Image (spheres, grey):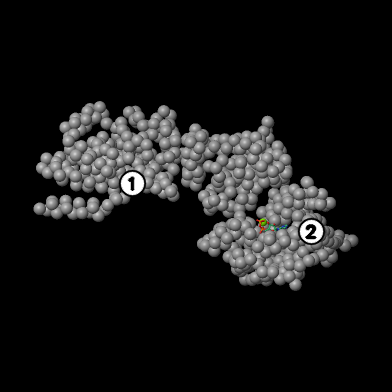
Amino acid sequence: MAIKEFKTATKRLLDLMINSIYTNKEIFLRELISNASDAIDKRHYLSLTDEKYASSEEYHILLSYNKDARTITIKDNGIGMTYDEVINNLGTIAKSGSKEFIEKLEKAENKESIDIIGQFGVGFYSAFMVADEVVVKTKSNASEKGYVFTSKGMDTYDLEESDYNQSGTEITLFLREDTEDYQYSKFLDDYELKRLVKKYSDYVRYPIQMNIVHEEPVYDEEGKMTDEVTKEVVLETLNSMKPIWKKNKNEVSTEELNDFYKQKFNDYQDPLTTIFTNVEGLLEYSALIYIPQKAPYNLYSDKYEKGLQLYTKGVFVLDKCKELVPDYLRFIKGLVDSADFDLNISREILQQSSQLTKIAKNIEKKIISELQKMLKNDRDKYLEFFDAFGINLKYGLYDNFGEKKDLLKDLILFTTINGDNLKTLDDYVKEMKEDQKYIYFASGKNKQAVLALPQMDKVKSKGYDVLVLTDDVDEFMIQILHEYEGKEFKSINQGELDLVSDDEKKEIEEIKESKKDLLSKMKEALKDEVSDVVLSSRLTESPVCLVSGDGLSFEMEKVLNQIPNQKGVKASRILEINPKHELFKAIETIYEKDPLLVDDYAQLLLSQALLIEGIPLEDPVKFSNMMCKLMINNAK
Ligand code: ADP
Ligand code: MG
């Protein structure tokens, strides 16, 4: 006997399958057929360079069932498995995704809605959802002997030599007993199996065949039906095989494209949009590109692999060809079929292929132009897209010193303070007031927070719109853009805003001149904390605000300081005081009465400005003590 133990993770997975928390049990057939098809792919691929893998018969996948024995058998003439391969592939979950899979499955609340089996390469074990015993007979072209693997889905499996002598694999499932909840025997039926193949495996490139018995009643001489029937067995091919992308574009319905996507890329939702192109000329290829509705759960993890599948003349070459997808479009799924590539091209050669680079460029342009069309013609859909993937476009714009900024700048949407709709920069510029020179922006948690900033006083009163920046990358992106249609970007808390008339400017100059001593006293008091104390032209209602000097902004300071080993970045701080506010007048009075008190007032003003800006105080206790002192003094 050769009883072996499953690896621990495998046991847990089996357990989950057997206890069947996943209700869409019928996908077991899709998984086993896809494995069979993969196995044939592998054999075919090797046979191109190695005689011993050549097959004398046509490649096929054979389905059969036995009602009495309650078995379903899936047989292929693919690569088969050696002894070690059976242990490694069926006795172990070696794939990194499987642990995540188990966690995901255990955590999932709505188990029915999650079609994640297969996405993680645990397809084979799905057999145990419907079977209580699985027997795998297999022989590899690379091995003299055949083997039989038997498992009841418990802790162990049995692996022995067998006389199975055809290259390939035959998997037999012994179906579970029917229960009140589930009729496992429904799979022991021509129609049901045909239906499942059509639904899940129609585009498998090899014929999926089944012997179908056709019964014809026998008629007697008088033409009356007798009790007898003649039986004729016909080997039928159940799938249409022709790859969808090889069909004529107008022959393919949206539904077909969507079904193909869900089946191929393991999504349970339709794609948001599909791009299907056939390019002819110097560069020849077909591409079928999908933008999902939602980001895959692991899109932002290191484990996520971007890429498109690569085929040549309908034959699979490579699973995740990452050269075909720029980083910022890493969420797209799909495939490219081009006759220009050799079937056994190596990854290294592929990387240097100028054909591939050209195709990648074309595809990128195509996707961007489709997105532009969507933005123009179907705003709601674009909003959905932007909600899911807008952040990727922003990073794309910022990356490589803005190399892609012209391509992407019109695809970015912004929340703004005027109105509830998201706006493009084009929308913003078109709505600019006649006297408005800049595109204003402000960073904050959300629109409300931005609206509450004292720096917004003047801009608001002018009726100018302001872009509300909420993502970490936003200010960096704006900095890379620098301008749009000749209009410069201007932060509402940085530099001169050009918000006041020449008369007002003159007035402020005059106050500044007359209060020179007071201002320099305050500046002296705050010399360790701020680079300047100035009279503000951006405030109307509020007494003070904190702005940053040119270069680094407070928002960038915050973002950069979150990066490990990057502590201590600091934007320069300027305290702005509203010369028309009563508080300023109060300070003037204090200055005349008791100049020493101005130090405390300056500290208090700065603390307030910091708090409003959302920057934590370095010494909150000192702030509190000063407040107390002021309150006590007031009571005297
Ligand atoms: P995946 O298909 O994602 O690799 P599966 O759990 O479906 O994961 O299959 C595990 C492995 O078992 C496959 O990668 C393959 O090596 C092997 N295998 C499964 N079915 C077959 C088969 N019919 N012929 C050859 N190898 C197979
Ligand atoms: Mg599989």
130 up-or-down from 141: above or below: below
User: Residue 449: which numbered mark, if any?
Assistant: 1
Looking at the image, which residue is at 61% across and 41% down? 323
For marks 2 and 1, give the one nearer the viewer: 2
Judge: label 2 CB < 8 Å from ligand 1.
no
User: Residue 143: which numbered mark, if any?
Assistant: 2
Front residue of 157 and 619: 619
Looking at the image, which residue is at 89% across and 61% down? 221
Q: Residues within 10 Å of mark 2 (few under 14, many from 20)?
A: few
Q: What percent of the width, then of the height, locates residue 434? A: 34, 28
Is residue 147 something one can see in this rendering?
A: yes
Looking at the image, which residue is at 12% across and 53% down? 635
Front residue of 373 and 516: 516
- The three-letter amino acid code for the residue at tag 2 is Ser
Residue 165 sits in quarter = bottom right
- The three-letter amino acid code for the residue at tag 1 is Ala
Q: What percent of the width, then of the height, locates residue 439? A: 37, 34
Q: What percent of the width, then of the height, locates residue 506? A: 22, 28
Q: CA distance from mark 2 to mark 1?
A: 69 Å
Q: What percent of the width, then of the height, locates residue 50? A: 79, 48
- Residue sticking out furthest to the bottom: 1
